[in-house]
Image (cartoon, grey):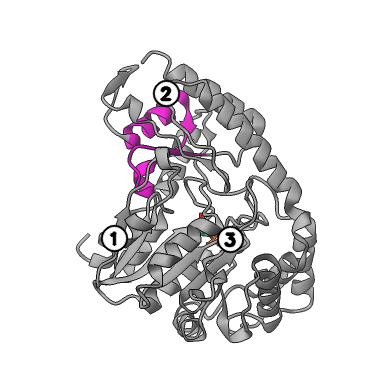
């Protein structure tokens, strides 16, 4: 479309949303599709949070909030960072945004100049590369594989650094692989980064609470890194609040001020009712969401045991989030039920059309050997989906 800007014409459509659209289309044709493609909890927002939102409406929270968030919400974020992460931030270091997605977009927009390189350990969340490109940065993908648990090594990080490197951006727990950097692993990466003081780290910790292996570690916990880290978090995943659209950062003050300036011209701040509700969410003890995390843990066990019974799926045990990311390159070059599979995108499409199960191709995450299955679905859906997948690939 020549009337549209290069900016939008060069942008890739989110593959997860594209898969959701294709799924909807097939459903409308009457096909019984099981969706394992979406990255959102299949729970409702807890009642105590909903009640706080209703109260906010009745209390007439209907005007513009401060651009960077209500003071009470910033204080709740400060308390959360201290309580859960041992991180100390003051109000001037906190910016509340319209989802962690906007927090990430703000970070890219205020840090990157055209041509600056951003190191993205693969696999990475779909939007990272597009957000970087929108800010005229250059994504630099660092590959990992199922064999090394999808973890980049300090040597790989160092090899990817050039004089143009301005940022390193990763999620831990990781969407899509479920890997979690331990404190020791983060320290080893930090040991490389301390040699390059101009590089900013964006640490996306939105899956923090969905952790099955132990303590969550943050890059900003290291004193020698604190001044260069933007810690991104939000309520979408932990509190089943994807549609409420609240995310936030803790960052060096000059970066927080820049993000505030950026969103002051773009959104004027996040939705006021959602912000009030999130104060209540963040003040709640983590034990309130434990049942949800326990459920994800059970489902992880179930999906892993079912995947284990299907030849051609090579899987790691995800340590967090609610995805499995099997390597399915075994199927490349094969023809199954008349469908020739040359890559992960073909395989994901094959599963949709033949098994009627929606997944997402690893191509979307910078890892073309894998597909992502979300287990934010009921146990019966997971069982049925895996039964169908097993049957679909049984004639290889
Ligand atoms: N970061 C990661 C790794 C995600 O998976 C997602 C959502 O899928 C987000 C950020 C965005 O979250 P939000 O809903 O707060 O914009």
User: For mark 2, does the 10 Å Cα neighbourhood hold few (<14), some (14 to 19), or many (20 or more) residues?
Assistant: some
Question: Is residue 357 highlighted in magenta?
Answer: yes
| Label 3 element class | loop
Q: Which image quadrant is residue 162 in?
A: bottom left
Q: Give the range drawn in magenta.
A: 344-373
Question: In this figure, which residue is indicated by the disc labeled 2?
Answer: 354
Q: Is residue 228 above or below residue 192?
A: below
Question: In this figure, which residue is indicated by the disc labeled 1?
Answer: 160
The answer to the question of whether label 1 and label 2 lie on touching residues, with beta carbons closer than 8 A, is no
User: For mark 3, does the 10 Å Cα neighbourhood hold few (<14), some (14 to 19), or many (20 or more) residues?
Assistant: many
Question: In this figure, which residue is indicated by the disc labeled 3?
Answer: 217
Looking at the image, tell me whether mark 3 or mark 2 is earlier in sequence order.
Answer: 3
| The residue at label 1 has a CB less than 8 Å from ligand 1 | no
Q: Identify the residue shown where x is 66% and y is 40%.
A: 297
Looking at the image, tell me whether mark 1 or mark 2 is earlier in sequence order.
Answer: 1
Q: Which of marks 3 and 2 is in front?
A: 3
Name the outermost residue toward the left. 2
Q: Identify the residue shown where x is 49% and y is 76%.
A: 224
Q: Identify the residue shown where x is 49% and y is 31%.
A: 357
Question: Does the rendering let one see residue 131?
Answer: yes
| Label 2 element class | helix
Q: How far apart in space, not on screen, are marks 1 and 2 (Cα)? A: 40 Å
Q: Is residue 45 above or below residue 8?
A: above
Question: Does the rendering let one see residue 129?
Answer: no
Q: How far apart in space, not on screen, are marks 3 and 2 (Cα)? A: 41 Å
Q: Which image quadrant is residue 228 in?
A: bottom left
Name the outermost residue toward the top. 395
x and y percent of residue 168 in the render?
39, 65
Q: Which image quadrant is residue 240 in?
A: bottom right
Q: Nearer the viewer, mark 1 or mark 2?
A: 1
């Amino acid at each position: 479309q020549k009337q549209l800007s290069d900016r939008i014409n060069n942008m890739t459509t989110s593959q997860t949303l594209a898969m959701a659209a294709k799924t909807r289309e097939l459903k409308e044709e009457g096909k019984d599709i099981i969706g394992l493609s979406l990255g959102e909890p299949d729970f409702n927002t807890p009642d105590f949070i909903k009640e706080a939102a209703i109260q906010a409406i009745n209390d007439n929270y209907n005007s513009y909030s401060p651009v960077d968030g209500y003071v009470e919400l910033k204080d709740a974020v400060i308390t959360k960072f201290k309580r859960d992460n041992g991180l100390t931030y003051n109000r001037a270091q906190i910016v509340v945004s319209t989802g962690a997605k906007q927090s990430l977009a703000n970070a890219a927009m205020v840090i990157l100049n055209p041509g600056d390189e951003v190191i993205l350990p693969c696999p990475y969340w779909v939007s990272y590369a597009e957000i970087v490109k929108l800010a005229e940065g250059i994504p630099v993908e660092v590959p990992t594989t199922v064999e090394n648990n999808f973890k980049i090594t300090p040597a790989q990080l160092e090899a990817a650094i050039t004089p143009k490197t301005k940022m390193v951006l990763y999620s831990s727990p990781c969407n899509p692989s479920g890997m979690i950097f331990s404190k020791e692993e983060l320290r080893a990466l930090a040991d490389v980064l301390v040699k390059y003081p101009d590089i900013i780290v964006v640490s996306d910790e939105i899956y923090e609470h969905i952790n099955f292996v132990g303590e969550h570690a943050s890059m900003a916990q290291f004193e020698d890194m604190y001044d260069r880290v933007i810690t991104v978090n939000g309520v979408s995943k932990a509190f089943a609040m994807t549609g409420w659209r609240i995310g936030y950062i803790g960052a060096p003050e000059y970066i927080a001020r820049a993000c505030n300036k950026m969103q002051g011209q773009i959104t004027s701040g996040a939705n006021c009712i959602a912000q009030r509700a999130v104060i209540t969410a963040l003040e709640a003890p983590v034990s309130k969401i434990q049942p949800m995390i326990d459920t994800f843990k059970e489902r992880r066990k179930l999906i892993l045991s079912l995947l284990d019974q299907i030849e051609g799926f090579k899987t790691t045990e995800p340590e967090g989030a609610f995805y499995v990311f099997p390597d399915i390159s075994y199927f490349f070059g094969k023809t199954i039920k008349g469908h020739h599979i040359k890559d992960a995108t073909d395989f994901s499409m094959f599963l949709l059309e033949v098994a009627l199960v929606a997944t997402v191709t690893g191509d979307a995450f910078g890892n073309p050997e894998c597909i992502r299955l979300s287990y934010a679905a009921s146990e019966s859906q997971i069982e049925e989906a895996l039964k169908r997948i097993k049957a679909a690939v049984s004639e290889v």
